[in-house]
Amino acid sequence: MLRSSRRMILPLRVLGRSGVNSTCLGRAIGPITLATWARRRLQLAIRRVDIPEYMVARRVRYRTDTSTLAEWPNTYWAERIEIGVSRAFSAALRRELPDWALCDTTCGDQRPTLALQVEFVPMDYLRSVRQLQARARITISSTDATPRVLRTEDLSFELTTDADTPQAQSQAIASLIQKVAAAAGPAVRNVKP
C-alpha cells in the first residue's frame, strides 16, 4: 500500500486473462485522504480494564488462602498494575482487530462505533498451587447518548505456572490478557452496531 500526504492508493484485485487473481496498484477514485480513510474505519473505544481493588498496589500480591493476601518480598510492579494490564490488553486487542481503529477511553474528537469494557473479578494468583484464577466479563456497548449493552460474555480461567516466582505470576497475567483479547476480538467483530 502506497501512501502520500494527499491521497492513498489502494491495491486492487483484478482478474487477469488467465482467470487468476492478481494484485495491481489502481488509481484512487477521487482523492482519499488518510483522515477520510480513518473516519470510514470502524472505531472501538477501549475503557480501562478493571481489576480487583485489592490487587491495585505497587507491591506484587498473591493469595495465600481465601481471605489472606501476601506480597512477594522486595518485588514491585514496573508500572501501576491497572495501567500495565490496560496497556497490554489494548496491544493484544490491536492484533485481534487489525481492521479497527482503537482508541483509549474517550477517543478525543473521534466518534467510536462501539465501546469495550473488561472487568476481572477475581484475579487471584494462588501461590500454594501456582495458579492464576480469574473471571473476566467482556461488555460491548453502543456509544449513543444513552449507551446500550449489545453483548456480554463471562469467561473463567485457571492458568498454572511452572515456577514459584513473581515472574511466573506476571507471565500468567500476561497469558490471561492474551486469552481475553483473543475472546474479545471475535465478540467485537460479531456485534452489529
Image (cartoon, rainbow, N blue to C red):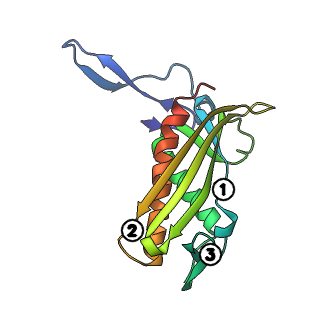
Element class at badge 2:
loop
Q: Mark 2 vs mark 3: which is more N-terminal? A: 3
Q: Measured from the top left, where is residue 109 in percent x and y?
A: 75, 41
Q: Is residue 159 above or below residue 168?
A: above
Q: Measured from the top left, where is residue 181 in percent x and y?
A: 50, 48
Q: In which quarter of the image is the N terminus?
A: top left
Characterize the local packing of mark 2: few (<14), some (14-19) or many (20 or more) Cα atoms within 10 angstroms. Answer: some
Query: Which residue is nearer to you in this view: 30 or 69?
Result: 69
The type of residue carrying mark 1 is Asp
- Quadrant of the image occupied by residue 111: top right
Q: Disc 1 designates what residue?
A: 50
Q: Residue at x 52, y 32 (%)?
A: 189
Residue 161, labelled with which disc?
2
Spatial separation of the CA atoms under disc 2 and disc 1: 23 Å
Q: Disc 3 designates what residue?
A: 68
Query: Which residue is nearer to you in this view: 124 or 41?
Result: 124
- List the single residue furthest toward the right: 145
Q: Mark 3 vs mark 1: which is more N-terminal? A: 1
Horizontal relation, residue 9 to residue 63: left or right: left
Q: Measured from the top left, where is residue 176 in percent x and y?
A: 48, 57
Q: Mark 2 vs mark 1: which is more N-terminal? A: 1
Q: Measured from the top left, where is residue 28 in percent x and y?
A: 49, 23
Element class at badge 3:
strand
